């Protein structure tokens, strides 16, 4: 299993947009996860922080590990409900809670969270000055078997640090505040340990992530870099010595554009993670988005059966077309009506209509009637439709069941729109439960 390179983002008051943009940039640059914190015990700032995290999880796909000050079980629950896959709680914060709120208050919050969400959702964050035996006893009491080890000193003795804490725990991250490069023998040895998941640092730069990863790989550390399973020499080029590339949005599946690569463009694409092409008209390489900022970042590269065309599924920043259109394919030549029964497409389309009704009410619309009546009416209808599903399911004929499920899904989407919830948020939560 590869070791994760995890940038550390600190939220600052009134800088939610910068925080979200930084997270998006790190994902695009190849971060495996994000570690995020607000470094505060202030309740109002924590609420603001969690709102920013919720918005960030809507816009990125990589996992988020969130550090919080947990005084109550509710603090952990709110943090996980942002979409973060796990929470870290500092050992020193637990001591602080116990001092402020009474004996073992912090312990109680963590125990409740472990019981409710499972051990895999909690990390205990421990500094390099803590006593290993004390930490082990507390972790056992809390039911936590994952540590985030914080090396705060500037010394290089990672081995001495690791020997204290590697035993008795399932997984670890190392958070090193002074990390500035990979030319550290002890750090490399530490990352080679099986239980170490990866390295967290505040000092990773957007454009340096791939360089860090490539350097670690050269030093024998398994990391998640872009690497082609097929040599460019084994691909079949066209009469111009180029490989056609069909570019597709990895989420919407929309075809965005068609371009071409020579071997150099392909190599740069693989090494940087950004789509690079060869311009036939200008006879030179070009990085998509280099002048406009509308970069394309690799998600998947697939070669067709004849090995003469590449399909690139990408994260597209901004529009793909120079005209400002999201896709270069917008001139309809022939159109024939058809029914699209793709479940995701249908649910998104219906949900889009429901949200449009909420924003632009239409006289006589049943959907607007529900919105006008409010949350209680919508909840009542959801409950009624759920009961109808139960009744219909007892009938051997499933034709009635499909109608009741359709009714329930419609009312559920009205509820989602009323509460400001999107399908992306729901499906991400399902992904986290795999």
Image (tube, grey):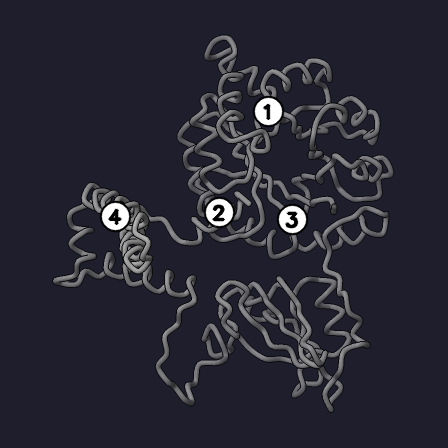
Tell me the residue that label 2 is attached to.
Answer: 430
- The answer to whether 384 appears left or right of 260 in the picture is left
Specify the quadrant of the image occupied by residue 135. Answer: top right
Q: Up-down: is 42 above or below 311? A: above
Q: Up-down: is 136 above or below 429? A: above
Label 2 secondary element: helix
In the picture, the disc for residue 72 is none
| Cα–Cα span, label 1 and label 4 | 48 Å
Specify the quadrant of the image occupied by residue 315. Answer: bottom right
Mark earlier in primary sequence (4, 3): 3
Tell me the residue that label 1 is attached to.
Answer: 90
Mark nearest the camera among 3 and 1 is 3
In the picture, the disc for residue 388 is 4
In the picture, the disc for residue 32 is 3
The front one of 218 and 137 is 137
Mark nearest the camera among 4 and 3 is 4
The front one of 271 and 386 is 386
């Amino acid at each position: 299993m590869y070791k994760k390179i995890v940038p550390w983002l600190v939220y600052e008051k009134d800088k939610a947009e910068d925080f979200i943009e930084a997270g998006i940039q790190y994902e695009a640059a190849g971060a495996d996860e994000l570690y995020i914190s607000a470094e505060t015990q202030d309740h109002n700032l924590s609420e603001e922080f969690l709102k920013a995290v919720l918005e960030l999880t809507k816009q990125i796909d990589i996992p988020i590990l969130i550090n919080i000050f947990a005084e109550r079980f509710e603090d952990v629950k709110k943090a996980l409900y942002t979409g973060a896959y796990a929470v870290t709680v500092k050992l020193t914060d637990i001591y602080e809670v116990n001092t402020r709120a009474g004996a073992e208050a912090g312990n109680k919050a963590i125990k409740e969270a472990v019981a409710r969400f499972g051990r895999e959702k909690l990390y205990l964050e421990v500094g390099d000055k803590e006593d290993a035996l004390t930490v082990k006893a507390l972790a056992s009491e809390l039911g936590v078997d994952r540590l985030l080890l914080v090396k705060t000193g500037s010394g290089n003795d990672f081995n001495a640090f690791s020997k204290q804490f590697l035993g008795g725990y399932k997984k670890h991250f190392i958070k090193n505040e002074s990390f500035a490069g990979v030319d550290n023998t002890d750090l490399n040895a530490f990352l080679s340990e099986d239980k170490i998941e990866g390295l967290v640092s505040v000092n990773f730069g957007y454009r340096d992530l791939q360089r860090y990863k490539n350097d670690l790989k050269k030093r024998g550390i398994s990391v998640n870099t872009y690497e082609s399973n097929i040599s460019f020499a084994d691909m079949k080029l066209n009469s111009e010595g180029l490989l056609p590339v069909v570019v597709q949005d990895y989420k919407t599946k929309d075809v965005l554009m068609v371009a071409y690569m020579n071997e150099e463009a392909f190599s740069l694409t693989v090494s940087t993670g950004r789509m690079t092409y060869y311009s036939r008209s200008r006879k030179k390489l070009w990085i998509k988005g280099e002048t406009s900022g509308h970069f394309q970042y690799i998600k998947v590269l697939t070669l067709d059966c004849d090995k003469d065309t590449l399909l690139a599924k990408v994260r597209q920043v901004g529009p793909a077309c120079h005209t400002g259109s999201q896709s270069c394919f917008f001139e309809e030549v022939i159109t024939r009506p058809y029914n699209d029964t793709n479940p995701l497409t249908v649910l998104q389309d219906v949900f889009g209509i429901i949200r449009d009704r909420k924003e632009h009410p239409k006289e006589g619309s049943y959907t607007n009637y529900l919105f006008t009546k409010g949350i209680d009416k919508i909840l009542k209808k959801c409950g009624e439709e759920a009961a109808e599903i139960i009744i219909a399911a007892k009938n051997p004929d499933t034709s009635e069941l499909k109608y009741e499920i359709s009714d329930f899904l419609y009312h559920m989407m009205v509820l989602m729109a009323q509460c400001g919830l999107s399908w992306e948020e729901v499906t991400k939560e399902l992904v986290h439960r795999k």
